[in-house]
Image (spheres, rainbow, N blue to C red):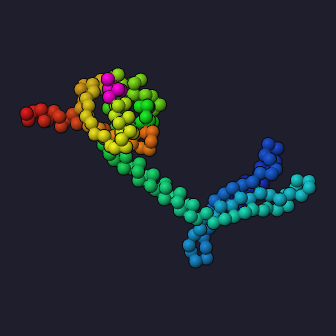
């Protein structure tokens, strides 16, 4: 009813095309109490003067598609929660060392800003570090094998920091790197020795 009323309200607007259609998805309750999802496409039928004479439509059961959409949404929510629970830094980069996405506090980054997406390593990190990581990206993609490595970096707000990284291929042209700050562990180890 609401959709029908909305479409009728558009009749007085000359900018609205008369041959418009309305697509909607509704959850329908069956007699046994179960539900199905229906996708509908409706349009008004008109006489030769353009006056509305009826409503015609096509509907189909889209329950399986909606089930898949809900499952995908839940999976994405779970993956996001998992990523947010990981205390490590996470970077997704392409084969050229361009940042595609990341999860990190800006204070943990060499380039302490929120706008590293679309920037290359060589634009925002020291040249030696950029070359080192670009080599790891190439090795990861060429071998198809996860690479483990360590490095240190002078972070302006924290001084020299030590990191362990794992870089894995993500398709043919991307990598994902999970990076852990191990400065506290390294400091404790140096006290023991």
Left or right, 10 with reference to 53: left
Can residue 130 be seen from the camera position used here?
yes
* Residue extent of the magenta highlight: 128-132
Residue 138 occupies quadrant:
top left
Q: Which residue is drawn at 27% across and 36% down?
A: 149
**Residue 144 figure quarter:** top left
| Residue at the extreme right | 48
Q: Where is residue 171 in the image (x, y as percent from the top left)?
A: 44, 44
**Residue 129 covered by magenta stretch:** yes
Magenta segment includes 14:
no
| Drawn side of residue 60 relative to residue 10, left or right | left
Q: In which quarter of the image is the C terminus?
A: top left
State whether residue 59 is above or below residue 20: below
Q: In front here: 108 or 182?
A: 182
Q: In this view, does 163 lie to the left or right of 174?
A: left
Viewer can see residue 177: no
Relative vertical location of residue 159 with respect to residue 39 in this rendering, above or below: above
- Location of residue 131 with respect to 16 vertically, above or below: above
Residue at image position (80%, 51%) is 19
In the rendered image, which quarter contains the N terminus?
A: bottom right
Q: Where is residue 36 in the image (x, y as percent from the top left)?
A: 59, 68
Toward the front, the furthest residue is 143
Residue 125, image x, y percentages: 36, 25
Magenta span: predominant SS is helix
- Name the residue located 61 percent from the left edge and 63 percent from the top edge: 62
How far from the left and from the top, in percent, is residue 83? Answer: 37, 46
Q: Which residue is drawn at 31% across and 40% down?
A: 147
């Amino acid at each position: 009813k609401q959709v029908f009323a909305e479409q009728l309200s558009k009749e007085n607007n000359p900018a609205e095309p008369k041959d418009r259609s309305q697509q909607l998805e509704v959850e329908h309750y069956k007699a046994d109490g179960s539900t199905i999802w229906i996708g509908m496409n409706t349009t008004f039928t008109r006489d030769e003067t353009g006056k509305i004479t009826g409503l015609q439509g096509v509907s189909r059961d889209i329950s399986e598609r909606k089930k898949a959409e809900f499952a995908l949404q839940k999976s994405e929510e779970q993956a996001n929660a998992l990523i947010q629970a990981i205390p490590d830094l996470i970077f997704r980069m392409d084969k050229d060392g361009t940042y595609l996405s990341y999860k990190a506090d800006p204070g943990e980054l060499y380039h302490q800003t929120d706008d590293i997406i679309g920037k290359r390593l060589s634009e925002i990190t020291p040249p030696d570090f950029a070359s080192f990581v670009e080599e790891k990206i190439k090795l990861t993609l060429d071998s198809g094998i996860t690479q483990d490595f360590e490095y240190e970096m002078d972070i302006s707000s924290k001084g020299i920091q030590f990191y362990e990284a794992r870089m894995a291929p993500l398709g043919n042209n991307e990598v994902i790197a999970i990076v852990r700050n191990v400065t506290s562990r390294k400091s404790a180890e140096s006290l023991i020795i």
